[in-house]
Structure formats: C-alpha cells, structure tokens
Image (cartoon, grey):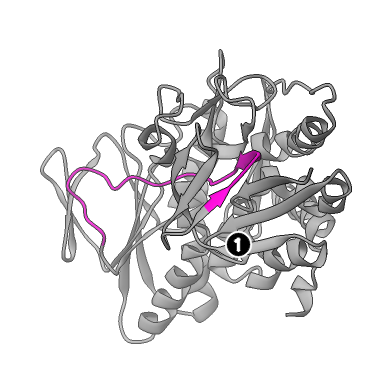
Amino acid sequence: MERNVVFVGGGHAHLTALLHLKDLRDNNAQVTLISPSGYHYYSGMGPGMLSGWYRPQEVRFHVKKMVEDRGGSFIEDAVIQVDAEKRTLLLVSGKTVPYDIVSFNTGSEIPFPGSARVQDNIFTVKPIVNLLSAREYILRRIADRQLHISVIGGGPAGVELAGNVWKIADDAGKKIKITLLAGTRLLKHLPDKVRSLCYRSLTERSIAIVEGSHVRQASDGALTLDDDSVVPYDMALLATGVTPPALFKRSGLPVGEDGGLLVNSFLQSVHFPEIFGGGDCISLEHYRLPRVGVQAVRQNPILYHNLLASLRDGELLEFFPQQTYLLIFNLGNGRGIFWRDNIVWEGRLAFRLKDYIDRKFMKKFQVSGELAE
C-alpha cells in the first residue's frame, strides 16, 4: 500500500532526501513538500547576498522544481498544527494533509528584543530571503542621505551583517553610519583571538560596536538600550539568536527546553517514531546543539537514510554531533576569519576558502537550473 511521506520545509537537512526523492517513490511512497516558498536560501551565503557579492540565483535552491521534477508534489503553504494521533497536518490555508511519515526542517525564528515590534525598517536575518529586501531598502535610500543602520546581535551573524552592510556603501561610494549593538560582549562564546580580529576589522572601517547593554525598545527612529542610552537608526538588522518555531509546543509534541522538536539520535521524535526532524527546529535528546548550519548539513544524509529505512523497515543510522566545527566569517571586504579548534587566522585566503566550500555545497543541490534563472 502506498504511504504518504511529507517534508515540512525545504531546508539544508532535507536536501539529500529531496534530491533522491525517486528512491522514496520506488519504495511505494507518495512524496509531498510543504514550504512557504518554492526557493530555499542558503544561510552561509546570506551576508554575501546582502552585500551584492552573490546574486540571489547563486544562493538558493529551487526546491519546488527539484521535487516536482522527481515526481513529488509541492504545496506552497505552512503548517500551523500537527495532530500526531491522527497523523495530519493543518495548514495556514485551512487544508489538512495526512501523513504516514513526516519530517520537519522548518528552520528557526528571530525573536524581537524587549518591546520591539515588527516595523518596515527592521529586518530579521531569518528567513534569509529577508536580506534581499534589506539590500533593496538600503540601495533605495542611500543616494539621498547618509543612513544610520544598526545591527542588533553580537554573534557571528551580527559581525557578518555589519561588514557586508559596509560593502554596500563602499561599492556605491556613499557614506553610511553603522552601529553593531553586541549585547553583553561581542562574540562572547568564541575565543578571544576570533573576537579581537573581528573587532579590529569592523572598527578599522568605522563600524561602531556597543557592548554591555541590550536593546529594550525599538520606536520610530530610536533604539533604547537597557542602560537608558538611545541609538538613532534609519534601518535595523536583527540577528539576536534563533529559536525554534512554536509549532511543536503548540501541537503538544515532546519538545526540548528551547521548544524544538525533541528527537533521539536517529533524528526521530522521542514519542512518535513516524515523525523526524533536522536543522534549527529540533532539540537533540541529551545534547545541547549549537544552532549553526553545519549541523543541518551533517544531518542531511542521516535523514535521507532513515526516511528510506522507515519505508523498508530497515535499520536506522544515528547522528553524532561534532564536538568542534569549522567557522569562517565573511567580513564583507574580501577577507575572512578562519576558526577551528585552536586554529585562528585572518586574510583573503580565508574568504576564498569559504567561497569555495559554499559553492561546492550549492553545486551539489542546484540541479534545477537555478543559475540560469
């Protein structure tokens, strides 16, 4: 009997399974992808897309075409409720989709700090496509006056965004005032050498870094920090850290402390073996996973194998998190910072290495004519 295999989200952790979707179909499965967009943008190249280093076509996967070319179905929608007992998904449109096996890779959300609210001049770094809108916003206004742009968040994303906003202005030959609101401390969880190299790179380009305080409120044209200081802004980019969507907790599924779908080492719900997940939306039982893209990339083949094994009643593979991982910063000036274990260095070669790794990953899954669009 044919079984319904449903993918919710076309993110990094699902790409191998979607690429080899025919294998699932050959094992008597009807395959459906549910996603709010036919494209998935790669987060590792997002800051470069913001600055114009990459065209949008170089940074995205046409997941709709990937699925449909391989005999699957695509639904442009989003899941708002999971009924695990009935094995159904409720969509924003009101439609209901049944499943026998479902896998979630819905990514993460950026919470607004304090009493900040959604405004048309505040852009969250997730979903990555928002960075296209942010770039267009800057370019429309940069010719008329000097903009004051604030980047909220002192992690790697905040550093990369600040550096790549600088590149937009540098390429246009315009002046721009950039403030990085780094919270307690810039890159507080990273080695001091990484922090000092990032700090120097930004400050040498007159990017102001504010540490020791968090954004409490965002009003029209002003960010109020919790020490009562005020930072004026024309536009803000929000990169304060990611949280899993509320979908799983709202649906009564087992979740981790942060609200992510709680999965075992097989990337399988701890209570519902027909539910799988990967990427930023999950919490791994007995581990605290850093929410970095490399996790989803490494979960990619594991999820593919385990979904196929579930159809065949085969043996599942375990996912073992890396204790260390490679991180290369795109500083926005053609240079990068390489960090792995105790190895830290800065230079143009670091950025070229990052560019090579990213393009190699993209080439593997850009099988739907993306570059020619």
Question: Which stretch is magenta?
Answer: 97-118
Q: Is residue 336 above or below residue 197?
A: below
Q: Residue at x 78, y 79 (%)?
A: 372
Q: How far across and down, in percent of the image, does residue 130 sit? A: 46, 64
Say which quarter of the image contains residue 70. bottom right
User: What residue is disc 1 on?
Assistant: 48
Taking the magenta stretch, the answer to whether it contains residue 112 is yes
Main SS of residues in magenta: loop
Q: How far across and down, in percent of the image, does residue 289 sit? A: 56, 25
Whether residue 242 is visible to the viewer of this picture, yes or no, is: no
Taking the magenta stretch, the answer to whether it contains residue 350 is no
Q: Quadrant of the C terminus?
A: bottom right
Q: How far across and down, in percent of the image, does residue 95 sit? A: 47, 59
Q: How far across and down, in percent of the image, does residue 250 sit? A: 36, 36
Horizontal side, residue 337 vs residue 365: left or right:
left
Q: Residue at x 52, y 58 (%)?
A: 128
Q: Quadrant of the N terminus?
A: top right
